Amino acid sequence: MTTLIVLSALGLVCLFSEILGFRKLLHPIVLIGLLASFVTNLMDWNNGAHLFNEMVVIDNYSVAFMGLMIGITFIWCLMSPDFFTEPSSETDHFALIVFALIGTMVMVTFANMIMLFLGIEILSIALYILAGSHKTKLSSNEAALKYFLMGSFATGFLLFGIALIYGATGSFNLAAISSMISEHHEQNSVMIVAGILMMMIALAFKVSAAPFHFWAPDVYQGAPTVITAFMSTVVKTAAFAAFYRLFIHTFSASPAIWAPTLMIISGLTILVGNITAVYQTNFKRMLAYSSISHAGYMVLAILAMNQSASSSLMFYATAYSISSITAFAILLLVSHQTGSDEIRSFNGLAKQNPFLSAVTLVAMLSLAGIPPTAGFFAKYYIFSAAIQNGYLGLVLIAILGSLIGVFYYFRIIIALFKSESEEKEIKVNTLFRVLLLVTSLAALALGIAPGMLAGLI
Amino acid sequence: MENVTRVIQLIPLNYYILLSTLLFCIGVIGVLFRRNAIVIFMCIELMLNAVNLLLAAFSSYRSDASGQVFVFFIMAVAAAEVAVGLAILTMIYRNTGSVDIDHLNKLKW
Amino acid sequence: MTQLAWLIPVFPLVGFLVISLGNKILPKQFSGVFASLTVLASFILSLAIFLQSPETGETVFVFDWIKSGGLSIPVSFLIDHISLTMLLIVTGVGFLIHVYSIGYMKEDEGYSRFFSYLNLFVFFMLLLVMGSNYIVMFAGWEGVGLCSYLLIGFWFKNTEYNNAANKAFIMNRIGDLGFLLGIILIYVTFGSVSFDDVFSAAKTLPDNQPVITAITLLLFVGAMGKSAQIPLYTWLPDAMAGPTPVSALIHAATMVTAGIYMVVRSNILYSISPFTLEVVSIIGMATALFAATIAMVQTDIKKVLAYSTVSQLGYMFVALGVGAYSTALFHVTTHAFFKALLFLAAGSVIHAMSGEQDVRKMGGLRKKLPITFAVFAIGTMAISGVPPFAGFFSKDEILARAWTQSPVLFFFLAVTSVLTAIYMFRVFFLTFYGTFRGTHDQEHHLHESPPSMTIPLVVLAILSTVGGFLGLPTVFSEHHFFGDFLKSSLSTPGTMLQSEASHTFEWTLIGVSIITLAGIIFWAFNHFVKKHRIPAIQETEFKPVAKLLYNKYYIDEIYQSTFVKPLYSISNFFWKIVDNSIVDGLVNGVSKSVVWAGQTIRLVQTGNVGFYIFAMVFGIIAMLLYNLVF
């Protein structure tokens, strides 16, 4: 609760800084604000609360995810100072990021459909603007429009689903809906079935699961790289946390309605994401497809629905976010200094800059799920949770998908060690050096001792 | 207020559901088949308003105010969304001189 | 002492970290010496534990790796006689190869990088052999695969080398998939992946359980990938693109025997699955023969050795297939000695020839490279099975064990062993005898290698000479040191015949092999040295008579046209058609089809929002229809 207030205040401070003229101080203020909210968030651990007539419920699940997202945002803010130097929109950018973060906070604490809707919209509206924040660049414009059109279209389905469920159960409260559905188990009306499916579709859109993933590659590629980094880490985590929270708290009594469909979505997402990524030559676009395939793996956690599912989702989100943010930070460096975000700008990096290529190696191994990195255990936990619930076939598809995945992640690694190299030497400043070292070590630490995080929630 | 509720309940609930589903589908079809981004926005708004209608109907049939509260939220959010959407469109029109969505396909494959 | 075993893999890991992180700061020479010292430290510690010789297996717990729900996977090491044997091989031979590399890689610009990879490899290999459960083993398994991949592509100037690295990678992936599925199935069946739990549960199971057969077959697929068996073997000859010490360390002495080790480790599972054992011995036999025929026509010195490695690995699998686990490990040991020796000696030759690997361009090197000549001769005799060199005893034991199992197996193995002797002496004579056939520059440059290269060669040569006495056959001695040492760690196969071959048979075997070998050496010397039959000429014309063989005139002629020629053409056929087209084609086909699918599916991403929304609505309608109507 305090966390949400701290962040909202921070957002307002960002907006006021323009008028009151302390724009220059904003970057440190935001960082301090994020730290403060991180601390207040931690104080809620094992100290949950039901607030505002059951609109918001804070529990360990939400605290863990909020902590993760604030942490990643903190790292993100450190790695993207360039994004905030444009004088005309500096404060807006800060404010939008903070508000987007507030949206994600609402998305993991909601206990009522209204809050779910508000959370998603607070996040999305901020993101529509951020995706288009390179105002003069056509690709950024296009990304913003595509994202906006398809996002608001998906929102329509979310709302229609909520309305149908409201019509059938008479409530927006998750607990009430859940008990209504499980009490009248046999007679699930058409309204409930259609309502659940429509909400699932909208959420599948938000997490970019096939066949609702089409926006993701284009938007990820077109948006400014820093925003893509934010979207593929914090936003994706939030969308999954919300997806999981909704389906586990509300619809877990009737998996027969949605589980078969979600199974198909998961398998399709894994295959489409991985296979399409194989042919990409643009690093950013490849990461976009890879993030689609990771969405497919994370859907497995929702299907698993058991004790270990929430912690395995948390672990996956952490491992994925850490490795992804590392990859994007590297991409920022490389594309900024070579002027291109194609895979070939990584050629011969091993010789020029061993440090950068070592962290790239860790990030790619982790994304590919190869031990001893965090990505391996992330996959392991999710797969074993899914197998426990009887999804052996789907897990086999997922393993097949991750084998394909290895193929394209290793293309980057191979490129690192190619001999023909770009002339330009890539420099890494101290800030980035520290950041990359920290994230890579975190990825390795989680891969060597996953117990630190695994049984947390 | 009592009066309004009674008037709403004069018409069977199924009619409301059918009407709003129909409106929603019209919205979806509009999004599918129109190429002008502004018209597409309008169609999306139509979808949202179909939901509003449905919520209002459910709310009065169940004598539960929360449905109508939700309608207010949707209206407020839709307004914000339109503001952002129109801003994006203006930006695109400045850069390309067109709001035809078929012209925006530089990002692909 | 045993409790300190966790330090063994830590040493090379430290070496890797220090060298790779201190790349820029530390002097170049330091990294080679430091890397060698870390492996030496591991060796000394292994030796100390070995001398103390714990009677039964001891588990050394290091830390908890995964602990979630019912599953707990600790990182812990199992120190028993099997792993001790492998530890000594990996660290001992590994150390010699490190020392050798100091000289061999001296002028390479990637000197430090090379040593950091080598150390990393040793670390993973130790993890593989020491792990006390399948997961730790798998971690090591993947790690050595990665290092192998990095080292094959070490000289990444050349796309062919990169292709070789890619091929190795893909082939190993297929094997790894089998291994992984096997581990999953083990977990599903036994509820645990630790060796102790699995094996003690398996001991009580009856033979021929379908699930055990499935597990063992899947594990064997993993072993096929790593140990280069048909049909997953083609990567190994290509892997010779890496620097020669790598070929010696990874692709001859240690990593490729990981598959053997894994089967030996799981011997209890294999023993209760006779069907799998049959599959293992058939595949091993086919590989042994097949690779040996291919080796007959190769002219690249490293390629010959590579195919001979494949062939020898086939031998080891036959030993496993007939339930002679300790014999297989015995051959792993002797093979590690003489194959490392041969590769390193070949490296010394290549070093002297300024990178030339074609035996047709060599010849007469024995005067210029006396030490290399001597050790290569010892290696050749060891691999060919000349008594009393190491290969003789281990190979003899496999042959004897195969005989008790099935005369067919024995027959094909015997043929293979004849072929082995032929191609090895062919290479040996072509390289060291006759006249020099290279360019003038090369001749001028010829020199013996520096001591850092020749000392390891000499040590390995000594080991290759005396290594066989670890396991004297029963005719010589009642005490089979190697077999007795391993006995406590191996199960007794339930249905396997444990009968030893009779003494008469062994004597006959020894006698026949000595006579055959003498014949082969004589023939090869005559053919390649006296008659100067270097392979390039051989394919177009062959002279009918040779003076010294005049009384065997017709036999020679018949031999040439009815046996050698068809054999050459068959092996050419296998090499060109089966190896290059079918097997390669299959492997490349899988990767190509994935790439093709990627290329096609991405076209769906048209970039047009209208289409995206259309696809989305289509998906929504399909889902609603599926759930509401059907």
Image: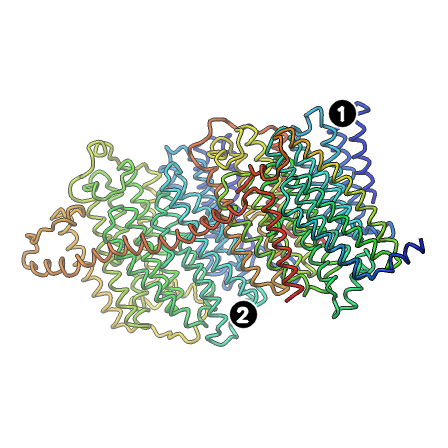
Which quadrant holds the N terminus of chain A? top right
Q: Which one is nearer the viewer's eye here, C12 or C350?
A: C350
Question: The numbered mark 1 sits on a residue in which chain?
Answer: A
Question: The numbered mark 2 sits on a residue in which chain?
Answer: C
Here the colouring is rainbow
Task: Identify the element where label 2 is drawn.
Answer: helix
Q: Which residue is mark 2?
A: C200
The image quadrant that residue C353 belongs to is top left
**Mark 2 neighbour class, 10 Å CA radius: few under 14, some 14 to 19, many 20 or more:** few
Q: Which one is nearer the viewer's eye here, C602 or C8?
A: C602
Q: Which residue is mark 1?
A: A23
Pointers 2 and 1 in contact (C-beta within 8 Å): no
User: Whole-percent x and y of residue A455?
Assistant: 69, 55
Q: Which one is nearer the viewer's eye here, C568 or C603?
A: C603
User: Whole-percent x and y of residue C338?
Assistant: 32, 52
Q: Amino acid at mark 1?
A: Arg
**Mark 1 neighbour class, 10 Å CA radius: few under 14, some 14 to 19, many 20 or more:** some
Vertical placement of residue B84 versus C217, above or below: above
Q: Amino acid at mark 2?
A: Ser
Kindly tell me whether residue A361 is visible in this rendering: yes
**C-alpha separation, residue under disc 2 versus residue under disc 1:** 70 Å
Vertical placement of residue C506 versus A107, above or below: below
C293 relative to A45 in the view: left or right: left
Which quadrant holds the C terminus of chain A? bottom right
Task: Identify the element where label 1 is drawn.
Answer: helix
